Image (spheres, rainbow, N blue to C red):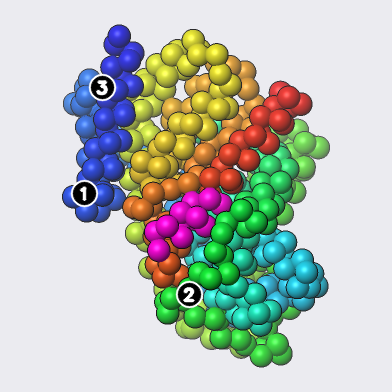
Amino acid sequence: MANLLDLIWVFVGILLLVFLIVKVKMHNILALILSGLFIAFAEGMKIGQIVPTIEKGVGGVLSTLALIVIFGAIIGKLMTDSGASQQIADTIVEKMGVKLLPFALLIIGTIFGMSMFYEVAFLITVPLVISIAKEAKIPYMKLIIPTIAGATMGHSIFPPQPGPMALVTAFHADIAQVYIWGFVVIVPTIICSGVLIRRFIPGLAEMPLGNVMKPAPKKPKAELPGFGISLLVPLLPAILMIFSSIIKLLYKQTSFMYKFASFIGSAEISMLLAVLVAMVAFGYARGVSGKEITKSMTGAIEGISNVLLVIAAGGIMKQVIIDSGIGNVIVELVGKVPISPFILAWIITVLIRILTGQGAVAAITAAGIVAPMITAFHVSPVLMVLACACGSNTTTLMYDGGFLLFQQSFGISLKDTFKTWGALEFVNSVVGLLVVLVLNLFIK
């Protein structure tokens, strides 16, 4: 009975969070702190333990994710200002042609989603896609769906994005394997959510486009950076992380090469190197002054400061769940339920995402609950990362940031938003989980 009460208090704390955000219109940071405090007191944590838990929760998230989020925003800004984003989109669309346009946009969305914060990727890709739709004379929503399907999945599954990075850290998963098996998960998933699903959504061609999003102004082709460097910069962190994991397999932990590979393959250093390459390739080499580059970087950091602090506040609830021992209680109860731990982890993450409206917060909070399951049930940490990542990228409600960004940007109705954003996110989440369950038959 006591164990059940522990779970009830967590659920009440999450409901309190939703009430404060949706009804009271309280800022997400304060709502997350107050909800975390409620759970801490309800679970009977000693008063002297609560403040250290809060500091540990915020500090743990910021120490892992702060530089990653900041560097990602800077890369996105430099790519936009230089026209690198346009070069990637133009080249991929040109090579694949109109017939394969939806698949081209799946690739573009995924590249941008895995290399920069989702809101940044959305605001970069959508104007480009609207321009492509006008040129190809295709209803814009038929091209937006594959783009957003790729962007949301790329952002949710691949490090160094905040959600998957938090899961990788909490579960001690191998980053290279997360990339390899994440690629296996994402391919069928985004084909289903970005291409096949469009056949089952009525009225796509008639959906109006509001006056918020405009087609992206086109830079002359001669002014654009080369395609190779435009693509290398956003993918450089992933390349370095995979390279690092391969090198570490070949050398002993005490060797210099192992330590060097660990250094350059870390999320922070790989992102820093990508920023430095972006500054040179998209800035100095193109005659942009250091003052202008610094101005762009400052604007990028200002743009994501609020998001970064919300993610940090989400670490409080995660740490309360860990320090109060609720995670172990959940494992004990779950052990009596005849269901896959991957499905349970997915359900937990889905519920937190729906209730809180924050994908990264859902992943971070779920990490504290799910981590004990990995040892208890002897499952693959990599597959558990992917199961939770799919759960954090699910269908959402009207107070979710992603839902509102989609609806307000296109000026469409709530009904049409559920038909498009809601449907593609639901398919992303469910198909992704199904692929993870299939992989579990072969990976232990």
Find the magenta span and give its range: 413-424
* Residue drawn at the location 28% of the way across and 43% of the way down: 18
Mark 2: amino acid: Leu
- Judge depth for marks 3 and 1 and give the one in front: 1
Q: Secondary structure at mark 3?
A: loop
- Judge depth for marks 2 and 3 and give the one in front: 2
- The residue under label 2 is 209
Dots 2, 1 in contact, CB < 8 A:
no
- The residue under label 1 is 23
* Residue drawn at the location 43% of the way across and 14% of the way down: 333
User: Which sits earlier in the primary sequence, circle 2 or circle 1?
Assistant: 1
Residue 240 in the figure: left or right of residue 68 = right
Give the position of the N terminus as an image quadrant.
Answer: top left
Residue 332 in the figure: left or right of residue 150 = left
Spatial CA distance of label 2 from label 1 is: 30 Å
* Viewer-closest of 400 and 59: 400
* Residue 398 locus on image (x, y percent): 36, 53
